[in-house]
Image (cartoon, rainbow, N blue to C red):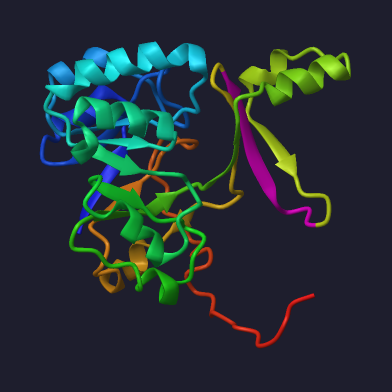
Amino acid sequence: MKYITTLVNLEQLNNSSSYYIAGNESFSCKSPAYFDVEIVEKYDNLYISINKIFHNDEIEKLENYLKYLKNKKIRGIFFSDFALYSIANKLGMLDLLIYDPNTLVVNYKELEFFEGKIKGVVISPFISLEELKQFKSDKLELFFLGNGRINLFYSKRKLVSNYCKYHDIENDFLAHDLVLREELRNNLYYPIVEDKNGTFLYSPFIYSCLDIENELTNINYLIIDLVYDKKFIKGDNLGFLDKSIVYRKGDLK
């Protein structure tokens, strides 16, 4: 098993034996920092994040970016929008693609669709350990969140700014750390961030499976995501990993 860390600063790249995920603000979101596209000219231990939702007027720019990356020494491209898949297929770049729909891949049978087509798949952290162990593939590299906050919600809309506009509130507090408090559970605060790419809501806890990584023999890479906290903070929440699967017989009404 290997580790991949989201890139916060260029100093991290001095450790050439490690792998990092780098994003550019025009093509990626949910990154702890953004870098010029030319970063791939200097380093060969990078994965590239292109995980935005793309509008029609952005497709030509996206295709030009993929053409630029095609002959660079990158280890892979994390994506979620299938517009990128279509373009990469045309350019002969499917072997670089890693499907990362955030929380959607929860069934091991989904791997069959991607086997023989792309490089890898990121499995949802909203899954029990029992279910996670069912994910196995000889034709795909499997990725899983090792430590970090889970992105619970992503919208291209500027939801915080729109809220301020609707309520006639000055929105200069966007530069501050904002949270949503759950109404029925006062101790849960969900970080919310708005930037040029939209609005993002994160889990109130830092998730981690590092203490049980020896059980994840089917996973090729653990992702250390620094997206919100910008530094490594060891999480103490296993999410659904320590939950049992319960099947109910009969019709659900």
> Would residue 190 be counted in the magenta stretch?
yes
**Considering the image in quadrants, where does the C terminus appear?**
bottom right
Indicate whether 197 appears above or below 82. above
Q: Relative to residue 204, is residue 79 drawn left or right?
A: left
Q: Is residue 36 visible?
A: no
**Considering the image in quadrants, where does the N terminus appear?**
bottom left
- Residue farthest front in this picture: 90
Q: Return the residue nearer the eye: 89 or 102.
A: 89
Residue drawn at (22%, 17%), measured in percent from left and top? 67
Q: Relative to residue 109, is residue 245 drawn left or right?
A: right
Residue drawn at (41%, 39%), measured in percent from left and top? 226
Indicate whether 207 appears above or below 180. below
Residue 250 image position (x, y, % from top left)? 70, 86
Indicate whether 62 appears above or below 94. above
Residue 227 image position (x, y, % from top left)? 45, 36
Residue drawn at (71%, 13%), measured in percent from left and top? 172
Q: Relative to residue 141, is residue 17 drawn left or right?
A: left
Magenta portion: prevailing SS class: strand
Q: Relative to residue 107, is residue 193 drawn left or right?
A: right
Q: What range of the chain is rendered magenta? A: 185-195
Residue 98 image position (x, y, % from top left)? 30, 43
Indicate whether 232 appears above or below 29. below
Question: Quarter of the image holding residue 140?
Answer: bottom left
Q: Return the residue nearer the eye: 93 or 171.
A: 93
Residue 217 image position (x, y, % from top left)? 24, 70
Q: Is residue 219 visible?
A: yes
